[in-house]
Amino acid sequence: MIVIEREYQAYLDEMQVITIIIPLTHHRDDEGTFTLVNDGTEIPLTIVDQIHHTEFIKYICHLQEVLNLGTQYWIKDNLQRKTDLQIGAVTRTNAFDDAFYYEGQLGVCYQPDHSDFKLWAPTATGVKLKLMTPDRTNQEIIDLTRGDKGVWAASVHRNLEYSLYTYLVCVNLQWKEAVDPYTTAVTANGEEGVIIDLTKTTRSKIMLPPLEHAVDCVIYETHIRDLTIHPNSGVSHKGAYMGAAELETKSSNGSLTALSYIKELGVTHIEFLPLHDFAGVDELGKKKEYNWGYNPLHYNVPDGSYSTDPHNPYCRINELKSLIDTIHQNGLRVILDVVYNHVYERETSSFENIVPGYYFRHDEHGMPSNGTGVGNDIASERKMVRKFILDSVLFWLSEYHVDGFRFDLMGILDIDTMKEIRSAVDWIDPSVLLIGEGWDLNTPLTMDKKANIHNQSRLERIGQFNDWFRDSIKGSTFNTYDLGYALGNEHYYNMAIQVLAGSIGFGNKEEGLFTEPGQSVNYVESHDNHTLWDKLVVCLPCEEQSTIEKYHRLATVMVLLAQGIPFLHSGQEFFRTKKGEGNSYKSSDEINQLDWDRKDEFFHHVNYIKGMIEIRKSHRAFRLPSADLIRKHLCFLSLKKPLIGWNLQDVGAYGPSQSIIVLLNPTKADEIVSLPEGNWNIMADDDKSGIIPINCVKEKLLLKPISSYVLFKV
């Protein structure tokens, strides 16, 4: 590092604009000219503005030419005082983006006899490759050569498999060390990248039956550790990829747990909380720490805390690929929860160390924006940031054969990035599911560019978590004591009708939240906030447990029978509790674990939800793929408020002709309803559900308190 005493500072803030800041303690009245210096050449600067502050004077200077970034420049004033020209806000300009966008491959390309390294670092004046032996006893420093678009490259002609590597990058006279953002393998706790031969981990893709529409999905969200860590999970490798892949595991009561249980439940997709390398759990410790995984370190590497050997860079890769293969072999698909909206720590991230100021958004004062609430927002609208996100998504899709992505805080990302992801993914597999949290977040993007719910009409075939559904059915997430429709609150009656019809504006398109039902991810519970059970216990302290169970069941049934994409939080079907903890992102295993004893305790409710999933999957009418088909084939019945009932009529080419009725009673009273003409098989009542008829009725039906019914016309 070059150490320099700066009497004043100079920044390149646009491609041809330099800002010079001189503290009043160093200011002289006879100042007034500045010169750009490089290799003996001096170019006068034109001062176009002076801004006087209480502590300094700011000079805005123009250049007649565009600088050669990657070269060290100096600024000299008329008193012969010299300072280095630092890279400033220029990295956040469109001109910079256009000048340095690089379409090619980045990262390490390994071959047994040589390895090629490429790093995008256009503002760096020097880049070195630091190679280390696996035991770190020997290291070698290799200079990289700058090429077009600010890409630095080097080739090392020997076998580097298992070698550790980082980059040393010099920007603004400071050398900083960074792990390659494109690395695909790391050491324990992600301290260095590791050069591996990914072809050694290659597996043939297991082909599954076609997935026709997004609404055919039933998503089951879980966490690798939560799934198996319970003492009675019956899993040998608890809390690990290998444990999640174990089959025929059983609880102390002899019933299925973990993956085999999920298969038996009948869902179509398992959504895993973040698996990419994250901070918060010491991979080499005793795993006393817990974390959901929303602290991203390395986006293209599986986290080592779920590996049986974090020291072995191949181990975590092979174990995760084996898990995904096992899930596919059991007819299920995999969705990854991905966190491209922020990093764990901006200041220490590889992005910031390699190209300072580029990868993150800043506000009008030049401060890092914080729409994510964690101190930084990824600037997805910049070309090389968008490229990184797109490259990463395609890497997971092609290398790990995943089937979908859930974008954490998708509202931070921009519309064009999400649309490009959808387009690129479609070239590989149009059935890949893309969903995200489309919340409107306070990040420095104009409203028309945010990938949030308000712009859903421009985000075709990208699902969004439907907070309208969530809050209408169970009550406000952020007001624990607010009760939704399923909990007996008639105030939400009209909203419940709308969200059950896919939130498309049933009867009036202008009142809809979404254009198509495949955009609506319907849920009442997820890893975030209180579980539904914990909310109910707080809201209804005087109710008997049996009543709370009925309310819970009704809310879950509405998720499964509504038009759109149903989403279940793991354990929701057996009244999952986190003992009242509303934000368990780093709570103990005892709080977060799936309690398999509880699953045995409430097996009757589990079977009921399983039957409802069977019913949903049995007929296209529950999974109408377009708003037009919903308006054509769904008709709400005229029932006494707050009862809700709807008739699903002939769906033509989308399945066998059949008339279906769904009835919901959120009240504590018995209610009698008149049925349309004909004989009706009861497929679900207040106690049982499934694809085998329970009974046959006509003309009238008694609805038990807090219950749901499904009837198929004979």
Image (cartoon, rainbow, N blue to C red):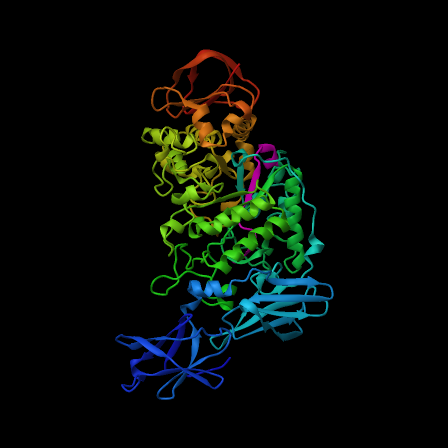
Residue 537 visible in the displayed image? no
- On the picture, is 419 further left or further right than 57? right
Q: Is residue 266 magenta?
A: yes
Does the segment drawn in magenta span residue 512? no
Q: Is residue 382 rendered to the left or right of residue 240?
A: left
**Residue located farthest toward the front when viewing the structure as drawn:** 64
Measuring from the top left, give residue 679's x and y in whole percent. Answer: 50, 11
Residue 47 place in picture, x, y as percent: 33, 77
Q: Which residues are magenta?
A: 261-280
**Looking at the image, which residue is at 51% across and 60% down?**
384
Q: Nearer the viewer, residue 296 or 598?
A: 296
The residue drawn where x is 42% and y is 68% is: 90
Q: Residue at x 38, y 49 (%)?
A: 448
Residue 179 lies in quadrant: bottom right
Relative to residue 437, is residue 376 depicted above or below? below
Q: Is residue 170 visible?
A: yes
**Residue 358 rendering spot, x and y as whole percentages:** 46, 64
Q: Quadrant of residue 235?
A: top right
- Given residues 504 and 256, the one toward you in this image is 504
